[in-house]
Image (cartoon, helix red, strand yellow):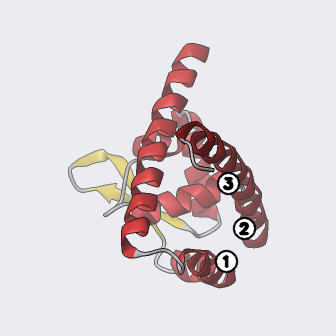
Amino acid sequence: MSNRAELLARVVEESQRHYAAYSLFNQAMADRIGLHPTDVQCIALLDLEPGPVTTGEIARLTGLSSGSASRLVDRLEKAGFVQRQPDPHDRRRALVALAPDAAARTAEAWEVPGKAFGAALERYTVEELGIIADYLHRTAEVGRDQARRLTVEAG
C-alpha cells in the first residue's frame, strides 16, 4: 500500500478491528474480575487520575449519566474497589478514590495481557511509539467529543 487513500482505508479498517477486539477483551477482563465492563473501565480511568474525583467527574470520564455514575460507584464500593471520602473543600459532597488494594486485585488478571500488549509494541522505534501515542491521544479526544455530540443529539 503506497498511496494515502489506501493507507487511510487500512487505518480505518484496522481501527474498527482494534475497537472490536478491545471490546471483547474488556468484556473478558470484566468477567474474569467479576465486574461489569463499564466498572473495569472506570477503575482504569480512576487509576489515571492524580487523585480522588467526584461522582460527577466519573460521569464525565465514563460518559454515564449522573445517576448511572452513582450506581457504578455504589457497585464498585460494595465490591471493595473504591472508597468514598469527604471532600475537604465541600462537606456536602464525597470524593471517590481507588481502594488501596484495587490495583493488586486487578494486577493478577492483567499480568499475561499486559505482557502480550507490551510484546506487540517491542518492534517499534521510539519515534514510531511517539506517533502511535499521538494517534491514540488524538483519536481518544475525537471519540470523547463525538460521544458527547451524539448524546446531546439523542437527548
Q: CA distance from mark 1 to mark 2?
A: 9 Å
Q: Secondary structure at mark 2?
A: helix
- On screen, residue 108 versus residue 73, left or right, reads right
At 55% from the left and 33% from the top, the residue drawn is: 65
Look at label 1 and name its amino acid.
Pro
Query: Where 69 falls versus 95 (above or below)?
Result: above
Q: Residues within 10 Å of mark 2 (few under 14, many from 20)?
A: some
Q: Which residue is mark 1?
A: 113
Mark found first going from the N terminus, 3 or 1? 3
- Disc 2: which residue: 29
Pointer 1 and pointer 2: residues touching (CB < 8 Å)? yes
Closer to the chain start, of discs 1 and 2, is: 2
Q: Which residue is mark 3?
A: 18
Among the two numbered marks 2 and 3 on one chain, the one whose residue lies closer to the N terminus: 3
Please name whichever residue, 100 or 118, is drawn nearer the observer in this view of the structure. 118
Q: How many labels, in total?
A: 3
The amino acid type, in three-letter code, at marker 2 is Met
What SS does tag 1 mark? Answer: helix
Q: Which mark is residue 15?
A: none
